Amino acid sequence: MERRIFLRNASAFVTSLMLSSCGGSDNSGGTQAVTLPTTPTPGPTPQPTASGVAKARVIVVGGGMAGATVAKYLRLWGDSIEVTLIDKAQVYTSNILSSLVLTGQRSIASLEYSYDTLRSTYGINFVHDEVVAIDPAATEVTLASGARLKADRIVLAPGIDFDAVPGLTDSGVMPHAWKAGPQTTILAQQLAAMPSGGTVVLTIPPAPYRCPPGPYERACLVADWLRLNRPASKILILDANPQIIVEKDNFESAFTRLYAGIVEYHSSVAIDSVDQASKTLSTSGGMIRGDVINLIPRQKAPLLVSKTGLANDATGRFASVNVLDYSSTAASTIHVIGDSSATTQPKAGHIANQEAKICADAIIRSLGGLAPDPAPITTSACFSTITMTQASWLHAMYEYNASAKAMQLIPASFAASAGWSAGDYKDMNTWFGSLMADTFA
């Protein structure tokens, strides 16, 4: 199948599949039906080119949603492209659905994905190491082990990093748990140890940050867990943004009606510093103490991106890219995808998967002397757990605007559930399984 057709029809198919299975509501929020005319398109059969003399070499730094996907599709679609995927972790731990670990509904192990299939089925070289330096001019990376690797292209997909918070020297005291793993477990343990009548504080950083609905979703989950397991407890939400930035109707309804008396939401609250010993936050709204503090700091691209000179957007925090191929505007042989890039699309796992496919297609075209697809389309889909058994959903598609040289929302594609339901919770798990299979299987 021609890659451009696959990219377009696959986006449309995901839209049709998700929206046709959603829209019901169990909480009197009404029903919203959405129909988009699409033709289901099957995914490509894994048929990577036979190993032998490589026509080109690509190094992928970071094995998360963006990195694993671009590595897989470079091999799936490429003509004898040798792909090396480098990550300091032996397995990837999904951030998607990781808040369910806090309520005991999932384990960290259930969110772990190995790179075995990428190696065995697609012939990807996996290197368990860390990239500590990049030479854009030489298209070369230096590993922590001291080894140096050269390639024709380098794809950076290192995820996010966090600003330091004054006074916070041990992140385990006030874990962000915004990278699934040990901090997720620590936060779950802190919640389990909190007595009834306690206070949980959850902070939301200024946008952009990873997974826009994620903090609000986590607040809902924790509120539901508190209601069932810690009577008379409450959760304070300190949002640095002037208002709820996504799914406002659903989250506002949940905070003020479903969890009235449990959730207190405060907007435009900046965190100035913390006192670890007393578990107190110094904020623009005053001093706030909590028994459990889920402190999510402001986010940025990791140090590797900035010290390579690629964090060149207007804020100096993320990498500006040409969204036709995700090449850095500072170094054309380096591509940056996923949360580290500065685009008009949300920073989320589904979008990272979509960006990776566009990047893979563009690199393959470029290595063959062709221009990238001039009209890429991406799909952003996500579910939010409003209770421990019910979810809402949100969907949007983006298309390339040649005048702005940016991806822009397709207004007719935007849709959200009017409320939340058990059926959407079930669909969430189906969507998650399909997305992870497309990335790692």
Image (spheres, rainbow, N blue to C red):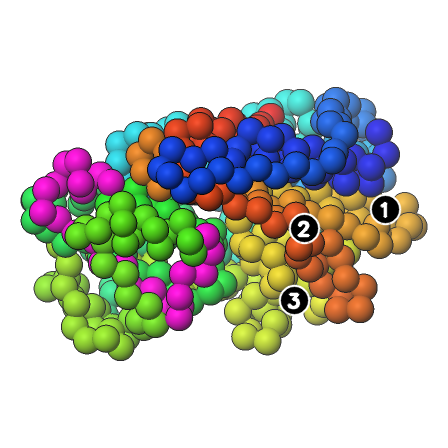
Residue 405 against residue 367 in the figure, above or below: below
Residue topped by disc 2? 412
Secondary structure, mark 1, is helix
For marks 1 and 3, give the CA distance: 21 Å
Residue 441 shown left or right of residue 160 in the figure: right
Secondary structure, mark 3, is strand
Quarter of the image holding residue 56?
top right
Magenta part of the protein: which range?
A: 224-247
* 332 part of magenta stretch: no
Give x and y (percent) for residue 147: 59, 48
Residue 232 shown left or right of residue 373 in the figure: left
Q: Amino acid at mark 2?
A: Ala
Report the residue at 35% width, 55% height from top: 252
Q: Residues within 10 Å of mark 3 (few under 14, many from 20)?
A: many
Q: Amino acid at mark 1?
A: Arg
Label annotation for residue 365: 1
> Sequence-wise, which precedes: disc 1 or disc 3?
3
Residue topped by disc 3? 320
Give x and y (percent) for residue 217: 37, 47
Give x and y (percent) for residue 140: 68, 55
Label annotation for residue 354: none
Q: Which sits in the foreground, 109 or 288?
A: 288
